[in-house]
Image (cartoon, rainbow, N blue to C red):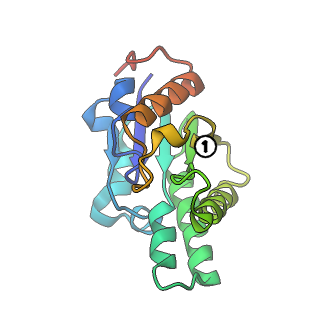
Amino acid sequence: MKILTIGDSWIDCQWPVIMGVTAPFRQGVRGSTAHQWATDYNSMLSKAIATEASSVIISLLGNDAISAASDGNVTLKEIIDGVSNLAKVVNAIKREQTIVLLYADPFCGKDPRATIGVKMINSAIKLACGGLDVDFADTGDCLTSDHFDGKDIHPNKDGQVAIAAMMTKILQIEAGKVAL
């Protein structure tokens, strides 16, 4: 099974490596947005489309949300643009099995703004994928407060292992045995 991973820093981390996904198939770009992917910035989307893989795992919209919220005012246009851009990427990159990540609350309920923000982002992701044949991988189902340091939005090493285990189960593969 060839697995392609695309998107933001939640993809450009260690869990794909733990699963055995090799560099040409790990196409995460830290800080990237659904807008950048949808507009083929630096040929990111073109490269991903050209990569032969039976499965794709996508993580996007977190950075779009952070950017939209940076001025303290998320507009309807920013929400619609984010949803539209993610839908465009998912439609363009769909494979036999398409998995879209949902984010876990990195502060595990200790910051109400983050809790609400993550719920809103995940709702927007589901809206963007509405009607598309995708599976959602809710990282909130496998990550706990032990998987975050309370400062960073990214899971720690144990969190990376937990995500790899969840993905391995979803993909029904043996850990570290991704065929290329």
Tally of numbered tags:
1
Q: Nearer the viewer, residue 102 or 135?
A: 102
Q: Nearer the viewer, residue 6 or 11?
A: 11
Q: Is residue 40 left or right of residue 42?
A: right
* Residue under the point 62% across and 60% down: 115
* Residue under the point 61% across and 43% down: 140
* Residue under the point 27% across and 37% down: 24
Q: Which residue type carries mark 1? A: Gly
Tell me: residue 70, above or below residue 168.
below
Q: Secondary structure at mark 1?
A: helix
Q: Nearer the viewer, residue 43 or 165?
A: 165
Q: Nearer the viewer, residue 168 or 81?
A: 168
Residue 2 visible within the image: yes
Q: Is residue 94 left or right of residue 12?
A: right
Residue at label 1? 140
**Residue located farthest toward the right when viewing the structure as drawn:** 131
Q: Quadrant of the N terminus?
A: top left
What x and y, as percent, mark residue 106? 51, 52
Q: Is residue 108 left or right of residue 151?
A: right
* Residue under the point 54% across and 61% down: 86
Structural crowding at the residue carrying mark 1, measured as other residues with C-alpha within 10 Å and reported as few (<14), some (14–19) or many (≥20): some
What x and y, as percent, mark residue 142? 58, 34
Q: Quadrant of the C terminus?
A: top left
What x and y, as percent, mark residue 160? 41, 35
Tell me: residue 142, above or below residue 171.
below
Residue 144 is drawn in which quadrant?
top right
What x and y, as percent, mark residue 52? 39, 35
Residue 54 visible within the image: no
Residue 19 is drawn in which quadrant?
top left
